[in-house]
Amino acid sequence: MEIILENQDKNIIDLSTCKGKKVLFFYPRANTPGCTIETREFGEFYESFKELGIEIFGVSKDTVKKQFNFAKKLETPFSLLSDIGGIVCEKFEVWQEKKFMGKTSMGIVRSTFLLDEDNEIIKEWRNVKVKGHVEEVLKFCKG
């Protein structure tokens, strides 16, 4: 699966050139409470994933500038990718109808994917609850 997006530093990231496994976590919007906690926790466990040969990437439809500010604020050690056009969100079927406080709208459903070297999905976590999620992903990756 082809995944090419711009990161917070305006670098084009082509995941097919990244060796090893990858964790892609999709989050609704930078600087919101749940997204901040999730991104911070992936940062806290980043070295543990790296020791397993796994790179982390966060993905949202936020602009590159918003991703830059979010990454800087959290001192994120991995790339936050801007999928402003929603192409990758569509590929992973995370852009869905959501209901919140009686209103229906389209948005990213918080989801995480473990990919192999060829960007094929090994494991997926959909409609994620933030609390304990990063530890659950790491536990799975450790086998």
Image (cartoon, rainbow, N blue to C red):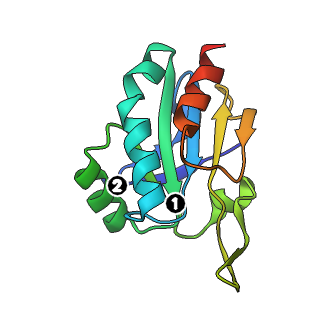
User: Which SS class for mark 1?
Assistant: strand
In percent of width and height, residue 65 lies at: 31, 66
Read off the residue under disc 1: 60
In the foreground, 123 or 45: 45
In percent of width and height, residue 130 lies at: 55, 48
The residue lying at 41 percent from left, 69 percent from top is: 63
Give the vertical position of 14 relative to 60 (above or below). Answer: above
Residue 137 placement: quadrant: top right
- Comes first in the chain, label 1 or label 2: 2
Left or right of 142: which side holds 49? left
Left or right of 41: which side holds 85? right
**Marks 2 and 1: in contact by CB < 8 Å?**
no
Type of the residue with mark 2: Gln
Q: Residues within 10 Å of mark 1 (few under 14, many from 20)?
A: many
In the foreground, 45 or 53: 45
Count of labels shown?
A: 2
Q: Quadrant of the C terminus?
A: top right
Give the vertical position of 73 relative to 76 (above or below). Answer: below
In percent of width and height, residue 46 lies at: 40, 29
In percent of width and height, residue 77 lies at: 32, 37
Type of the residue with mark 1: Ser
Read off the residue under disc 2: 8
Q: Nearer the viewer, mark 1 or mark 2?
A: 1
The residue lying at 31 percent from left, 52 percent from top is: 71
